[in-house]
Image: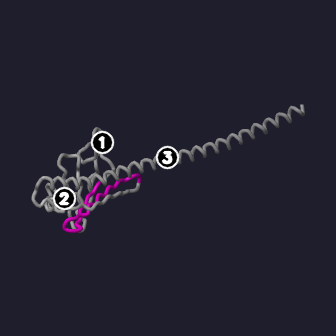
Amino acid sequence: MKKEISKSKENIYNAGFTLVETLVAIAIFATSITGLIAITAQGINDNVFVKNKLTASHLSAEGVELVRNMRDTIALSGTADSWETFLGDTSIGAGECYSTDETNICMIDGSVGQITAITCGEECPKLRYDEDSGTYGYLFNQETNFVRTISIAPISNDEVLIKSIVSWTQGQKTFTTSYQYNLLNWISI
């Protein structure tokens, strides 16, 4: 009978040891899974940031191209003094965006038939996205995080500096990307 009692104690000791081993294994497994989830979440966040940065870069370059298109359209229309019309006319040109100290901030919407420059002051509206056409503008239904501002400053009589800045918010941070271009009065050169 003594042997049965000692075997019974040995089984109890082994059962308890197996339970501790199981708990340690579960803790190690849970820690490794938590680490993998954290790495995956950071990867997804980085992927979203890269997508937003790429979109903002394209929107910023598009802002400069819209201003260039505005200048070319006026120059090719045969308007006398097309450069002055481009810089001064607020209805068809960049007049509202043009300032010597870059304080006039504008938004330019290329999604409508006529490109318009509208002074937006301290806070500009967010760009909107159209899923059907894949374009951004201000008249579409789906609001985005992107805000684009344009400023035009003189460099000389026949040259201006265009700055297109796109900002967006991701999480608690605001990011910006910009594109600038020296635009020439090519019609008089």
Q: What residue sits 30% from the left and 60% below the top?
A: 180
Report the residue at 89% width, 33% height from top: 3
Mark pair 3, 1: CA separation: 28 Å
Residue 38 x/y as whole percent: 53, 47
For the N terminus, the image quarter is top right
N-terminal of the pair, mark 3 or mark 1, is 3
Q: Quadrant of residue 102?
A: bottom left
Of the residues shown, which amino acid type is indicated by label 2? Ala
Q: Is residue 154 located in the magenta-colored stretch of the structure?
A: yes
| Real-space CA distance between mark 2 and mark 1, rounded to the nearest whole angstrom | 26 Å
Cα distance in 3D space between marks 3 and 2? 44 Å
Quadrant housing the C terminus: bottom left
Q: Which mark is residue 96?
A: none
Q: Earlier in the sequence, mark 2 or mark 1?
A: 2
Dots 2 and 1: beta carbons under 8 Å?
no
Q: In this rendered view, identify the residue nearer to me: 122 or 4.
A: 122
| Residue identified by numbered label 1 | 134
Q: Is residue 140 left or right of residue 47?
A: left
